[in-house]
Image: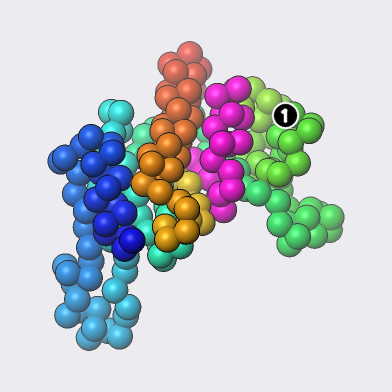
Amino acid sequence: MEPQEFLAEVRQRLGVPAGRIVDERELALAERKRLGLPASPPHLLTDYRGYPVKLDFIIRDELHFTVNAPILHRVSVRPWTIFDRFLRLVGLLAWAPFPDPTEQRFFLQGLSPENAARYLTPTHVKAFDELYPFAHWTANERGYQCLKGVDIDGGYTPADAVRDLDLLLDIVAADQAARSTVRP
């Protein structure tokens, strides 16, 4: 399945016929050829569950989810890598552990351990567990983002993409509910 076909099926499963699939290969092919750039993969822009969302193939095997919504905290959640563990060991990595000491797959950046314990609700923990494996999850000035490695030819389906988007939107909804009770 090609990325454009994958996104068309995602759009159909979301039930949002107004969603727009942008294929820059068609929009700017001449300019990209002139500059010697490869055509970038397509992306889907739509509104879903009340939020503007974008699903973007960075490359064929990486799907980037973006939800444009105000954030509660600026935070990143990343799976541990050998390099991250080395940086932590030598004191060059600013990080906070997950409040659950049994969770060893992820670490947090942008929150102190005390704020992490207050920020991460059971909704967050469940969503991160179900989104895993992912390369990076962040909430910043561009909204909520999640980068996942996917194999659209070998098992990752449009239904999986919709499920992952719903999990990301569950986090957004939990943050928006908490935001209404938190004073700046």
Q: Residue furthest right?
A: 89
Residue 132 position in % (x across, y down): 58, 43
Report the residue marked by disc 1. Answer: 99
Q: Is residue 153 highlighted in magenta?
A: no
Image quarter (top left, top right, bottom left or bottom right) of the N terminus: bottom left
Horizontal arrangement in the rendering, residue 6 relative to residue 20 (left or right): right
Residue at the image position 48 percent from the left and 30 percent from the top:
171
Is residue 144 at all visible to an observer of this figure? no
Q: Looking at numbered disc 1 in the image, what kind of residue is underneath it? A: Pro
Residue at the image position 42 percent from the left and 25 percent from the top:
173
**In the image, is residue 63 above or below residue 171?**
below
Q: Residues in magenta? A: 121-139
Is residue 166 at all visible to an observer of this figure? yes
**In the image, is residue 130 above or below residue 145?**
above
Residue 166 position in % (x across, y down): 41, 33
Q: In this rendered view, identify the residue nearer to me: 102 or 176.
A: 102
